[in-house]
Amino acid sequence: MPMNFLHRRICSSADWAASVAQRMPGDLAGVDLGDDVLEIGPGFGATTRVLAERVPRLTAVEIDEASVRLLRATFADRVEVVHGDGARLPFPDGRFSAVVCFTMLHHVPSVARQDALFAEACRVLRPGGVFRGVDSQLTVRFRLLHLGDTMVVLDSRTLAGRLRRAGFDRVEVAHEPRVRVRFLGHRPLGPAGPH
């Protein structure tokens, strides 16, 4: 979704990539991603670079065409990069062992589209598969960085319920006020689907 020039410059910088590489092990601690992982919305690929070193098979779905070209050039045959929309995933039911998204959900243009993305993440997971996400929370600096951008910040108070309605169980939400929110949900072992 749209990002202003300054925001694009920061997210494509070596400093941002280094910060992501330092933070990601903590974001993934205790989460078994399994053998076939889908990343939704990798943007410039800082998170993709970390994931590609940690998992046997990685697929990335990205909506921005320029980012798709960059990701394909950067990761070549190490990552399958698909041009598509996280709210309408072009994958069969139950394919992935895990779905992840990092610092991108606030760029999804509405709560309804975020909910559609959650439901799609649940659909493409195997029974017992995990959905791990991390996203930023609202601060003055964050708001200024997003002037002219799409920005729909997750409400940590309603997030667990939204994930359950999308079909997840064993939902965990950890909120660091004015910093970020981390969440984890599992596709049920029995029949899944939005309730």
Image: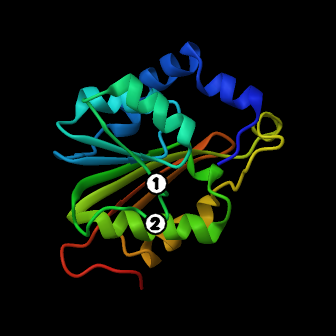
| Placement of 132 over or under 142, stated as above or below | below
| Extreme residue toward the bottom, this view | 195
Q: Mark 1 points at which residue?
A: 84
Q: How crowded is mark 2: few (under 14 residues within 10 Å), some or many (20 or more)?
A: few
Position of residue 134 in the picture relative to residue 106 (left or right): left
| Placement of 168 over or under 173, stated as above or below | below
The one of 6 and 169 positioned closer to us in this rendering: 6
Q: Mark 2 and 1 residues: CB-CB less than 8 Å, in contact? A: yes
Q: Where residue 158 sits in the image (x, y, percent)?
A: 59, 68
Image point (43%, 22%), residue name: 21
Say what secondary structure mark 2 lies in. loop
Q: Where residue 118 sits in the image (x, y, percent)?
A: 46, 65
> The disc labelled 1 sits on which kind of residue?
Gly
Say what secondary structure mark 1 lies in. loop
| Placement of 58 over or under 63, stated as above or below | above
Residue 53 falls in which quadrant of the image?
top left
Residue 195 falls in which quadrant of the image?
bottom left
Image point (76%, 45%), residue name: 149
| Placement of 146 over or under 49, stated as above or below | below
Image point (19%, 79%), residue name: 190
